[in-house]
Amino acid sequence: MATIKELSEKKPWLNWVLFFGTVVIVFLIGLFAASIVERRSEAQLYFQMVKPIPDWEPRHEVWGQNFPRQYESYMMTRDTTFESRYYGSVMIDYLEKYPELVIMWAGYAFARDYNQGRGHYYSVTDVHNTLRTVQPQPATCWTCKSTDVPRVMNEIGVREFYSHSWAEMGSEIVNSIGCQDCHDPQTMNLRITRPALAEAFERQGRNIEDATHQEMRSLVCAQCHVEYYFRGEDNYLTFPWDRGFSADDMEAYFDYHEFTDWVHGLSRAPMLKAQHPDYELYKTGVHAERGVSCADCHMPYQRDGGLKFTNHHLQSPLNNIAGSCQVCHRESEETLRQNVYDRQARISELRRITEKNLARVHLEAKAAWDAGATEDEMQEVLQLIRHAQWRWDWVAAANSMGFHSPNEALRVLGTSIQKSQEARVHLARVFSRYDVPQPVQLPDFSTKEKAQEVVGLDMAEIRAQKADFKQNILPGWLEEARKREAAYDQP
């Protein structure tokens, strides 16, 4: 058998093959070793604790001492200047912009006040400011607003927390949404701190502990950006996912349990109020189908020198197209922005048609009652109104103007329009029986103020109550919170 030396003498090119092969192997080994060193260096930098973090530490600044990059990017959620064509972080008075909503929410606190949600930094402040909390609310309303919630739940128990009133928990809930809500303070692993999500998984026969890291990058958002309701006398927070995530599935769930958020003040329909079913709408879209997480778009990775970290400036991807969309899509920023706007424009058009139909059908139903209509005559009308508004709200209450799943958003809005029109057909028959002239003459609700007058709201009194709260109650809450947090750092 010929030796390597003999082969190289017969075939001198073999020496070059061996040389370059050795170079490639050494290069690959070097890359692998460098990667290991880099990851170990990142881990040391990432987990080099300046100050130990207690299990239920709610204060962002304490976490920020250990993770300054994440903390600094989170603090950028204070900026409320970005405005896209439909959303962003700017404050928008939706009742001023769409006065039909006041009619649609007659008898419900949202008819008083409904604004665009600002950044997570303002989650507690905006709850203090809203006119909706003049009306007594359960402590369950705090669940998604603060890192103090897991701390209090751990101290007094989950069911006990829900059983209190919103005001009773006021001095406990002061820190906005932040680190504690999503991270284990010892390992920084993503974790679920709100039991309603894990409980919803259990009822579906799933174990949330089996979720992958990529799935968790959406599930930590799904603790709050979901549809939920308050079940029973103790207002136990529950996700209506037992039948599925779609608007139809959750509508069937609520009908089966005969659940009603409130009875409409004009039409007397047993109504449902969607919260913010972002996760459910996203689950029906192409990004979820492709395995893209919420964080991939709203909290993309970025590098600072040799360190890769998650940007915690939770915001619209349209304010960071290069870091979010262009990671996967190779089109220009302008093309991608226009792609989003084109889809949102179609959804916005149908949504506005839906809102006008719903406001009209509520007022027409009131006219039928005023004319003497009976419960039997109105039963089907009220069910159609309930379903029509639920389907509208399932799209409208979610952020993104439907972009998380444009096809499903359009389908659901289409069925909402169909159901509201069916209700109006039934009402036309009722009007004929009672000789009500058609079309029914409707009151003027062309502005927020006029609409609030139509539904019987005394806004001057409501604003006076809110002013009293901010002057005489809120300062006491904040003082109690300052004393408690000062005690955290005492030896």
Image (tube, rainbow, N blue to C red):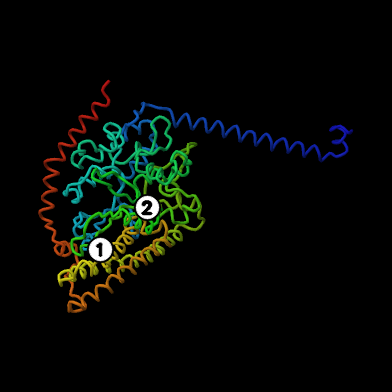
Where does the image place residue 359, in percent across and percent down from the top left? 24, 66
- Give the label on residue 98, or none: 1
Q: Position of residue 81 (x, y in %)?
A: 30, 52
Vertical order, 197 against 418 (above or below): above
Q: What residue appears at the point 38 percent right and 35 percent down from the top-left corner?
A: 68
- Residue at 14% x, 58% y is 457
Is the C-beta separation of discs 2 and 1 under 8 Å?
A: no
Quarter of the image with the N terminus in it: top right
- Which three-letter amino acid code belongs to the residue tagged 1? Tyr
Residue 237 placed where, x, y %?
Answer: 30, 45
Q: Is residue 68 above or below residue 427?
A: above
Of 319 and 215, nearer the camera is 215
Label 2 crowd bin: few (<14), some (14–19), many (20+), radius 10 Å: many
Instruction: Tell me if mark 1 has few (under 14), some (14-19) or many (20+) residues whose alpha carbon lies within 10 angstroms of its own.
Output: some
Quarter-of-image position of residue 396: bottom left
The residue mark sitting in front, 2 or 1, is 2
Q: Disc 1 on helix, strand or loop?
A: loop
